Amino acid sequence: MFEALEEIEEQVNQLVSEHMTCCNAADLGLDPRAGYRIYVADGMLAVDADTNRILRYYGGFEYIDAQFVKHMGNWVFYIEDDLGRVSDCLQFFSEKDAD
């Protein structure tokens, strides 16, 4: 069973590294203290579980409804909602990226 959990952890790590873009909090329009390694993909953000506390505190992510937060392995994924914090960050990132 332990090997299966390790395999899942490795698959999640691979997903993040291959399909998400690494950025920092300022790239998302957040207080720079909110994080230096935040990963972005279509409709979601991800952070390492060890640094999630910083994003929650400095980035205001503690107010995101639990239905939009998924924990997988050593990662925390924030899923885009209609008019919330994640949506604002993703929009800021895409507009910045377009410049």
Image (spheres, rainbow, N blue to C red):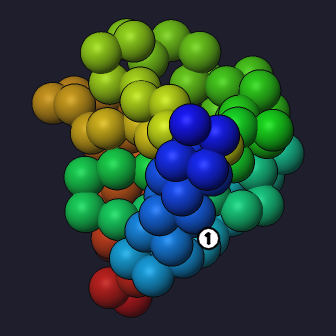
Amino acid type at mark 1: Cys
Percent x, y for residue 79? 31, 38
Label 1: few (<14), some or many (≥20) within 10 Å? some
Vertical placement of residue 31 versus 12, above or below = above
Vertical placement of residue 83 versus 16, above or below = above
In this view, which residue lies farthest toward the front? 1
- Give the residue displayed 57% in from the left and 43% down from the top: 5
- Give the residue displayed 42% in from the left and 37% down from the top: 78
In this view, which residue lies farthest toward the left? 82
| Residue 94 appears in view | yes
- Give the residue displayed 78% in from the left and 61% down from the top: 36
Percent x, y for residue 10? 57, 63
Percent x, y for residue 49? 70, 38
Query: Depth check: 72 or 22 in front?
Result: 72
Q: Quadrant of residue 20?
A: bottom left
According to the picture, the residue beneath numbered tag 1 turns out to be 23
| Residue 76 appears in view | no
- Give the residue displayed 22% in from the left and 31% down from the top: 81
In this view, which residue lies farthest toward the bottom? 99
Quadrant in which the C terminus appears: bottom left
Question: Which secondary structure, mark 1?
Answer: strand
Query: Depth check: 82 or 31 in front?
Result: 82
Vertical placement of residue 34 versus 27, above or below = above
Vertical placement of residue 37 versus 30, above or below = below
